[in-house]
Image: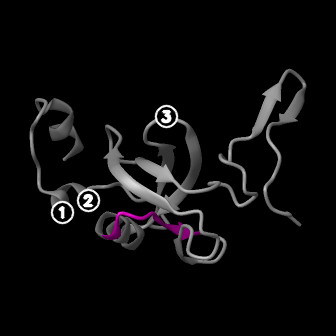
Amino acid sequence: MFTTLEHARAGGRFPLADVIGHIPWNDQGLVPAVAVQHDTGEVLMLAWMNRAALDETLHTRRTCYWSRSRQGLWRKGLTSGSVQHVKEVRLDCDGDALLLLVDQVAGACHTGRRSCFYNVIDGDEVVVRGNPAVSVP
């Protein structure tokens, strides 16, 4: 399926069920999903989705991920209010990663920071950018 998509002309259309059925889910039935702020391109976070999380995200237009630590669906913002409204979902060329263009409400990170990618490798040091908005144990 993804070979067909690689050779398709711009504007080509394919049934969603056929494409999702060919996603190469990993051994745990997961695929990585990168959330990006839709209007700025800011990379917010990386999480994992299983088929149920992807289906819910597409249906509700709010992100739902698979929590590997809790072994269950994780509806982003349900308890924190840090909701991600989905503008667009993209698959990469071979279908093994998702890109979610979202409108992020509040911080994407559990620390309250805007992005989970706040630790910057600078030479032989790691520099923390931005202060947490919540108390983290």
Q: CA distance from mark 2 to mark 1?
A: 5 Å
Q: Please state which of residues 77 and 49 is positioned toward the viewer in this rendering.
A: 77
Q: Position of residue 13 (x, y in %)?
A: 9, 45
Q: CA distance from mark 1 to mark 3?
A: 28 Å
> Which of marks 3 and 1 precedes in the sequence?
1
Within 10 Å of disc 3 (Cα), the crowding (few <14, some 14-19, many 20+) is few
The picture quadrant where one finds residue 15 is bottom left
Extent of the magenta region: 60-67
Contact, mark 1 vs mark 3 (Cβ under 8 Å): no
Q: Position of residue 75 (x, y in %)?
A: 51, 72
Helix, strand or loop at label 1? It is: helix
User: Which numbered circle lies on residue 72?
Assistant: none
Q: Is residue 120 on the magenta stretch?
A: no
Q: Is residue 63 on the magenta stretch?
A: yes
Q: Please state which of residues 3 and 129 is positioned toward the viewer in this rendering.
A: 129
Q: Which residue is mark 2?
A: 20
> Which of marks 2 and 3 precedes in the sequence?
2
Report the side of 11 relative to 112 (left or right): left
Q: Which residue is mark 3?
A: 41
**Residue type highlighted by circle 2:** Ile
User: Which numbered circle lies on residue 17?
Assistant: 1
Contact, mark 2 vs mark 1 (Cβ under 8 Å): yes
**Residue type highlighted by circle 3:** Gly
The picture quadrant where one finds residue 99 is top left
Which of the image's four quarters has the C terminus? Answer: bottom right
Within 10 Å of disc 2 (Cα), the crowding (few <14, some 14-19, many 20+) is some
Residue at 37 percent of width and 65 percent of height: 57
Q: Is residue 7 visible?
A: yes
Q: Is residue 123 shown above or below 109? A: above
Helix, strand or loop at label 2? It is: helix
